[in-house]
Amino acid sequence: MKRLLYSGSALCVFLLVMANIASASICQNDTNLVLGKSVTVAVVNNDAALAYEGESSSDITDGSLVYIDPSQRQEDGCVGWKNSVSGRTMTVVVDIDLGVACNITAIRYNKGNTPSAGMAADTITTSLGTTSINTGTSGAWTTQYAAAAVESSTVTITLTKTNTGADSDWMFIGEIEVYGSVVTTPVEEPPTSVLLNVPFLEQFYSLNGSSCGNGSCGPASLSMCACYVLGRSATYLDIVNVWSFLGRDTCGNDSSGTSLTELANAARGWPFGLSNVYRSTLTLQGVKDELAAGRPVVVHVQAGYLTTRKYTYTGGHYIAAIGYDEDHIICNDPGTMNGERCNYSNEDMTAAMAYKGNGVLRGFYQ
């Protein structure tokens, strides 16, 4: 009958320790990392693979062994191999893929319920060292403890057995257990405030004696974010170049303004060449996540919802989000010469973005 050997009890299980250490423990925070894991077994100098019909290498990690000493039966989940040549050493290598990185603190081996103690391995070698096998005390477990946890996503256990005479031609594995914990990567909290040094550019300018820029909030916001990535200042010529690339009035007085698709095309084209920029939708938190990653965002808003804006215009508008604190999004607003580093409340920005379907231009990096 197969029964559960170890279930991760809330109490520490104190065990006999080999190799110069008096005692150690496997505690509740250390679980059997290989329980139910598939194994790969390679054997050198083996004359009989898998001792019993119906047994398989999966029995090595199925957690079913209950050690009974002395045993009146063998077929309880043990697997074994035979080395029939006197004086020859047999080697059994067990590889186990843990699937994830783990901190390994202990490795245990038990030969299982066999008629003779001589059917155990002679030595076990793992990343924790080489240990002689315990053949007759305290449940016949041999346990290796790590002086410091060993991080790995795989475990290799090498067992050796030399045929020295009667009852030493077989080597059995009743169970192998590997204790420790899965490595967890700490989740970094985003910064509570961010401010990117994005250059400011007003959308209004003069060109050939004309007062320009009534529809230039999009090209101006794009130019600010693009020039930040390119590491240079932004000028009205960047706005003119965007209009020129789009084949539109270079004064930007077209009442239709620009679409996010047009701005994305201009970002990827001449003179910026930012191939990663694309139109998207983002929540307010999504904008903050971009900023926390060091990437400014062109945000499409309905200006009338920005109650602290410094102009009277209330329609559709583009601004450059360049930072945030707990209560605000910090923006370069090209709608006024006083629009550098404006603080718009989270509530105002949420409403202003939602009115325009949360449309943004993102991906400002190289």
Image: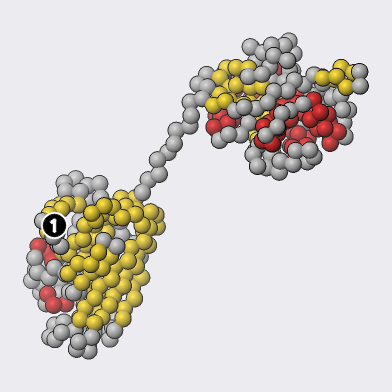
Residue at screen point 28% across, 65% down: 126
Viewer can see residue 25:
yes
Q: Quadrant for the N terminus, please.
A: bottom left
* Image spot of residue 244 (x, y percent): 86, 33
> Where 257 falls versus 8 (above or below)?
above
Q: Residue at x 52, y 19 (%)?
A: 327
Query: Considering only vertical position in the picture, is 168 above or below 211?
Result: below
Residue tagged by mark 1? 21
Which residue shows up at 27% across the image and 77% down it? Answer: 91
> What amino acid is labelled 1 in the image?
Ile
Q: Nearer the viewer, residue 200 or 45?
A: 200
**Where in the figure is residue 69, as x and y percent of width and height?**
9, 68
Callout 1: 10 Å neighbours few (<14), some, many (20+)?
A: few
Q: Mark 1 falls on what kind of element?
A: loop
In this rendering, would 233 be left or right of 181?
Answer: right
Furthest-front residue in view? 232
Residue 246 at x, y percent in the picture: 84, 35
For this orientation, the residue located farthest to the bottom is 85
Q: Residue 322: x and y, percent? A: 62, 26
Q: Quadrant of residue 145?
A: bottom left
Q: Quadrant of the C terminus?
A: top right
Residue toward you, 206 or 145:
206
The residue depicted at 28 percent of the width and 86 percent of the height is 47
